[in-house]
Amino acid sequence: MQRDHQQATTVGPLAGFTVGVTAARRADELGALLLRRGAAVLHAPALRIVPLSDDSELLTATKRLIDHAPDVVVATTAIGFRGWVEAADGWGLGDALLNRLRDVELLARGPKVRGAVRAAGLTEKWSPASESMAELLDRLLEEGVDGRRIAVQLHGEPLPGFVESLRAGGAEVVGVPVYRWMPPEDIGPVDRLLDATVARAVDAITFTSAPAAASLLDRAERRGMREDLLDALRHDVLPACVGPVTALPLEAQDVPTSQPERFRLGPLVQLLTAELPGRVRPLSVAGRRLEIRGHAVVVDGELRTVPPAGMALLRALARHPGWVVARAELLKVLPGAGRDEHAVETAMARLRAALGSPKLIQTVVKRGYRLALDAAADA
């Protein structure tokens, strides 16, 4: 017998899952990595970046540093450092800035920043192997900062305790705002992501900056759905953050987050490919292996797209595999079904067709429906 291949596709590790992307910068790169692994991607840039050359605050800070040399400059991001030098060139201050930076103690947070520093013809004095701002802070405090003038490249994210600790140690700290975050011009995608998150129609949200996380929370507050969002993130939707600084606004709201060991987009995607499938409990049903993912089902290694109503029914049956679920209970989970139990029969017929194997779900006359859990699994 020829096997039914309707809707069947090669199953990637994230096939059947929906991932929200809040990044403004490198969103296309992150989305492509997720799509390559089979995920459906919901783009919702929570912020936009003010171009450096248009930022009067950066111009003012640059002139101050050229006129009054700091003792130390802390470079925190590669894109920010490159943008700073390029913006200074546009203002006719490029050579003056580079000459000033050659005369100071230049610290680079990690290898990418170190590469940007060297590409500008400069040499860093030191860079932590951990890429950690905490390790940078420890080094500065060990050297002693009392009376020293320290310029810190800000990059739109909070640096909790960093600036405060330097000032407490007696340093004069000058912030260099290499770019600023602003609300997105089109708030529609953010609202759609919020609605999908509260409805549990996404399986994970990725965050690559703390301001994006804070912006999403702020928008939820403005729409009166902050608690609903927090409940979804705490229990059902995985918040995946590129690093601990990015996670701070969420963890301040008691939202547990997942973070890769290396603070990069690649490891962030690898984290999702491990964690999202790991949340799925495979079921042995009617001799088939069933995986219920976010918006689809994997049956014996084949991805089956299931309509939202069918997914709602299947999840209700899977909460207690093998148990009979009454039609009245199934009616409650059907979106917009009203009071007619015939809607359950219609949705169930479509679900069975989508799964490609009617025997996966048994009809129990006058009682309801049940997953045909195999005897060994049932035991």
Image (cartoon, helix red, strand yellow):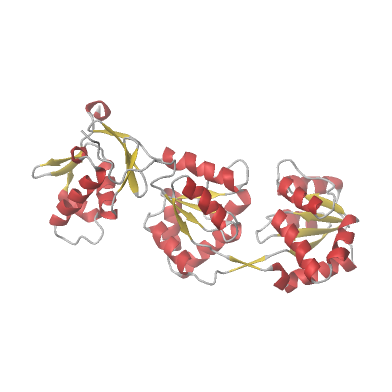
> What residue lies at 61% left-to-right and 48% top-to-bottom?
244
Percent from the top left, x then y, of residue 186?
50, 71
> What residue lies at 49% left-to-right and 70% top-to-bottom?
187
Q: Quadrant of the C terminus?
A: top left
Percent from the top left, x then y, of residue 138?
77, 45
Decide which of 17, 157 is in the foreground and name it: 17
Report if residue 252 is visible in the image: no
| In this picture, residue 197 sits left or right of residue 80 | left
Q: In which quarter of the image is the N terminus?
A: top left
Report if residue 368 is visible in the image: yes
Q: In this view, does 213 lie above or below 109?
A: below
Percent from the top left, x then y, of residue 346?
16, 53
Q: In this view, does 325 lie above or below 169?
A: above
Q: Is residue 216 above or below residue 145?
A: below
Q: Which residue, as the protein is rendered here, is positioned at the far right?
A: 103
| In this picture, residue 358 sits left or right of residue 224 | left
Decide which of 367, 254 is in the foreground and name it: 367
| In this picture, residue 181 sits left or right of residue 312 | right
